[in-house]
Image (cartoon, helix red, strand yellow):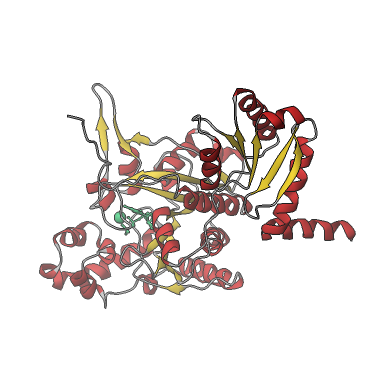
Amino acid sequence: MALTVKRPNGTQDIVPNEVNKWHTVESVVKDTAEQFGFREIRIPTFEETGLFVRSVGDTTDVVQKEMYTVSSAGEKTYTLRPEGTAGTIRAIIENGILNEGLPQKVYYTLSCFRHEKAQKGRLREFHQFGCELLGSASPAADADAIALAHNVLDRLGLKNIRLNINSIGCPECRAKYREALKAYFEPHRSELCETCRERLDKNPMRLLDCKSKEDQEIAKDAPVITDYLCEECAAHFESVKKQLGIMGIDFVVNPKIVRGLDYYTRTVFEFISEDIGSQGTVCGGGRYDGLVEELGGKPTPALGFAMGLERILLTMEAQGCEFMEQRTCDLYLVSMGDAAAEKAVEITARLREEGFYVEYDLVGRGLKAQMKYADKIRAKYVIVIGDSELESGSAKLKNMATGEQSDISLGEALLDDFGAKYYEMMLDTDDDFRSFVEAFADNGQE
Ligand code: ATP
Ligand code: MG
């Protein structure tokens, strides 16, 4: 009996018919990040487990129950990255990148692995676009990173995404706030979920992050961190808000946003979509001034964010956003007979070298079936080559959209002839191409 193997729970196949959606997001992310001065970094898929325990924090859901950890005989214990920040900071320290001048701005697009209950917008393998900005304690850096995330979402065409920001202060502000939270939640201890009872002792701020409705209800009137900020932290927060205002980026201050990491300091933020239900946080980030030092680097203020790309795509689909089109075949060469097939191969090689997308029959189909196939793959042009075309050295070039036919040389002139026809057709049918050409022509006249 044949073995039937299924995709693991919580993973996705990205099939060729859908991959243009990913290309759209990846290209916007890359272009925007680079325009903001971020450079790409690529890191390993797994790291020593201790890295995540120390950076993500051992009281977080991620470390307590979501990590995929493997150990092979006689080796250290490794974990599939549940997020990108820890590995990125490790790599930046290990490669001495902080010695190359500050600030350092890096971005990444990578897969993450978390052992979660799989549901819509919550997977076990998912993808993040993230960035990290190191070496600036200035509120300008917070605003710069937030602006990058905002621009990416905007360029993808997303609407109704609300930026929530908060400040969780420095360790001193937080110590006072923790006491206030403990005092508030203690009388409710028995009503809290089991995890939150533990949080109350170990890390009361995480209570505000609880997903249980009952706990959220209890937390409704909890003291807010912004009332406990020291003067410097309060001034920092004011300045971040002011700069967002200057950039025209709307936000709401949400004192319930505390984020998971222990090393977050001051600014934290989330972009929340209203269109994909409860898994609505499409991007989360914040400042983590203590992390570089914690991981063995010299003390360096830093911040970053990560965007969940599956949630971005869900939102784009829900909102009917546009995706980049799949590239379609420029020219399909239909051939009859061995000599014509060889000619098709030769022409294909020449035109591909010039950047055209060209295909010819690979499965030995007859004339009609080849035409049908060319139609199915939405080829823009077709040339049919048979004995008489080989003899005369000229064939018909058929525009598949209009049915219009014209003569084309199969010799030296083919490239020029085809190039000219192709250019004309693009001007007629492709608005982006036409405006590009027109803008170019206008510039030339000035
Ligand atoms: P949540 O509260 O939804 O569990 P989180 O706080 O665990 O999110 P982060 O660690 O901040 O998430 O990760 C950043 C972003 O990555 C999230 O805002 C979300 O868009 C995405 N993300 C996190 N976990 C998953 C997952 N299991 N599947 C898909 N996307 C995810
Ligand atoms: Mg989570």
Specify the quadrant of the image occupied by residue 341: top right
Quadrant, the C terminus: bottom right
- Residue at far right of view: 446
Residue 20 seen anywhere in this rendered image of the structure = yes
Q: x, y (%) of residue 44?
A: 42, 35
Q: x, y (%) of residue 85?
A: 42, 46
Q: Residue at x 38, y 53 (%)?
A: 263
Ligand 1 is found in which quarter of the picture? bottom left
User: Is residue 398 left or right of 411 when viewed as pictured?
Assistant: left
- Front residue of this view, candidates 15 and 369: 369
User: Is residue 133 left or right of 265 when viewed as pictured?
Assistant: right
- Residue at far front of view: 388
- Residue at far top of view: 74
Please say if 160 is above or below 372.
Answer: below
Specify the quadrant of the image occupied by residue 2: top left
Q: x, y (%) of residue 429?
A: 67, 58
Q: x, y (%) of residue 88?
A: 46, 42
User: Is residue 150 left or right of 431 when viewed as pictured?
Assistant: left
Please say if 292 is above or below 273.
Answer: above
Residue 269 seen anywhere in this rendered image of the structure = no
Specify the quadrant of the image occupied by residue 5: top left
Q: Residue at x 38, y 69 (%)?
A: 275
Please say if 284 is above or below 216.
Answer: above
- Residue at far left of view: 190
- Front residue of this view, candidates 239 and 18: 18
Number of numbered discs visible in the structure rendering: 0
Q: Residue at x 58, y 36 (%)?
A: 359
Quadrant, the N terminus: top left
- Front residue of this view, candidates 232 and 21: 21
